[in-house]
Image (cartoon, rainbow, N blue to C red):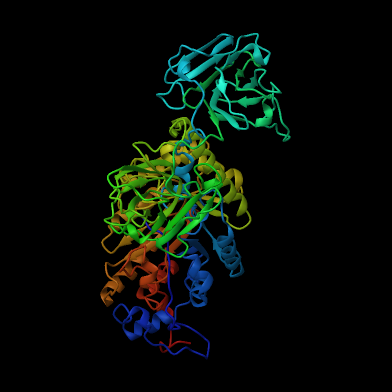
Amino acid sequence: MKYKYIIPIIATSLLIFSSCDDNLMEWEKDPTHGEVTGAELPLALVEKIGRYDALKTYTDFALGNGIGIDLYMNNETYRKIVNENFDEVTPGYEMKHGAMVNSKGEINFTTVDAFLAKTKAAGLRVFGHTLVWHSNQNASYLNSIIAPTVIPGSSGTNILDNAGLKNGTFTNWARNNPGKGISVVSNSGLTNTSSAIQLMSSTTSAAAYSLQLTSPDVPIVTGHNYEISFYIKSDVAGKGRISFDASLTNQYPYKDWYNTGGSWVEAFATTSSWQQVKIKLAPGDFKTGSTKFKFNLDLGYLPNVTYLIDVNSFAVVDLDAAATVVNMVANGNFNTDISGWSKYNGATDALSLAASANAYEGNGAMKVVNATTDTGNQWKTQIHTDFTSTLTAGKSYTISYMIRSEAAGSVRCSTVGGSAQYQGDQVTSPTWKLVEWKITAAGTETGFNFDLGGVAGTYYIDNVLVTTGETSGGGATAPITIDKTDAEKTKIIGDAMTDWISKMMTHYKTGVFSWDVVNEPMKEDGTLRSGNEGDTAADYFSWVKYLGKDYAVTAFKLARQYGNTTDKLFINDYNLESRLDKCDGLIEYVKYIESKGGTVDGIGTQMHISLTTDKNLIVQMFQKLAASGKLIKISELDVRLGTNAPTVEQQASQAAMYQYVIDMYKKYIPVAQQYGVTIWGVSDNSKEHEFWLPDESPNLWDANYVRKHAYKGTADGLAGKDVSLGFSGELVKP
């Protein structure tokens, strides 16, 4: 079953179907949803249904209802119906990962906490739904933490002579103390195609200089600041420093790295992950009259360590050098503000400054929010800037920028002035991407736009550059993209699951005592989903794809570890009544989970059914589930009719199907295994079915929240008899 969430809406004027209150409400048509849906039931039947007690009085097992939190919290009449008729409620959407986890992985408990307080006051239990699913996830966040790492180029033009490193000859470089060896190895750098300097310390290495590589002369300009940077990793924990020749007043400066206490230390630490090392030199660090300097990589502190330094990332930059590229927009880095940029089209809050956490580099980025997808009308969210000088007709220009979006998105640029030019649509993702657009100027252009109206989402833009020539310029190296390995992705997603489940179970340890831990793990043929089913929904994220078959084992272990030992932990799936092979597969998967140390208390069968659902298969499903020995829950029961205006006959058939399902549940599931039944949704109101079964009438109350024939069928099923046979006297409301 795919749905976003349940949003039931109540008519402003409602028929009070059973009340001892003398102040009965006058009842009339609600103009918000037309005529009363469904044919009128015979008066005698209406009167019978009106004399029924609340549903929960007819059963001893848990009678639940799948609801929307917002309506329950804010509509008193709806809340009264739920409170009177049910023992337990299951939030349709609001307790899921997508609803509670933000773009930083933080969990917002506020809405659900208030809901729990309200339901507790009403004597209702809450069933947690759901911890691990492939839909309704914050897929943007989960994909972002396993996205490739994008490393910016250096801060400016590289003045370090790297030729001897790139060709492996070490020309102008000195391997003063080579340890076990200093060499250049191919395909070992930040990317699979880049080279790395390999430095290996000896078995007796103990002093920093025992493994040392010395740079060529680096020219300097009096009064300028400089930055040395490179990316390094080691096969085991390592340690290194940068030292200098006599051109510096202090040849062993403690600069740009800290120990845990926050004080300067001599050396930086290395691990098996790539990390950037930077050291900045101020004019006061150089001796008076110095025109050049050399530096040493000292990596001999520890024995038997192999270091790799990416050649392409190795740079020395004059931070005060004159810009080699003239940017034809006034503000392209957004380090302090978004001055020079304005919203031409879009929502009032479409344009803002993003903090450094969302910048490609530096202290900020431009943030653009496009609320509505409008394919082909990209201009409907449009951000503009002017060129700082007039473009020359016939001359080539390059517009380049870094961009990412919180989910899959799209961007294009367009020029302003004269006949507009349009860039082709560019796909964006949570990974930073360098985009370049080359144009030949007509000479009438006054500025350009970012057009972001094609796909709804939140976008971040940084390092905007408009320049002449064939390249965008800007740095010693182009940005480097590093893909995470499968092993790294497995660990990251495993950690994310641990964080999510542990915090949910801990936070709700005293308020929620039953959970759908794993939702919809099986394919229709009874095999386990693999994560390669091709779902492209924006909220789709497959845990099994990264964690493998044991993802559910881990989920159940975590839920038990951080919850209560007495919590009831369920696995839940749909179509078990129509695909017995799927039912068999789910039961076998439960056995597998428990063989690996997890504990599954119960199995939920959703049962989103219709009048044509095979009743014999329903019986066989219950027989199979009963044989599992687990608690069995009908977790999301509704009976659709294929119309939002059912006939009297259709409503009678629907009532009979509700009763049949409950009768068979009670007949074939032993009492000790009967957890209970949850009816999915309250009414047939069209707003309640905006995302789930639109234009339908699957529930126990009609579009105006009047009890349907299905209410009687459900109550009779729960009671195990026709309750109305016990009525005596005239059929009038008490």
697 relative position to 559: left or right: left
**Percent position of residue 250, x then y:** 71, 23
Residue 466 in view = yes
For residue 42, which quarter of the picture?
Answer: bottom left
Quadrant occupied by the N terminus: bottom left
Q: Residue 58 versus residue 577: which sits nearer the camera? A: 577
446 relative position to 509: left or right: left
- Residue in the image at 47% along x and 62% along y: 349
**Percent position of residue 230, x then y:** 54, 27
For residue 440, which quarter of the picture?
Answer: top left
494 relative position to 373: left or right: right
The image shows residue 510, relative to residue 693, as above or below, that is above
Residue 596 in view = no
**Percent position of residue 176, x then y:** 59, 9
Q: Residue 173 versus residue 134: which sits nearer the camera? A: 173
**Percent position of residue 347, x then y:** 43, 64
Q: Residue 83 versus residue 587: which sits nearer the camera? A: 83
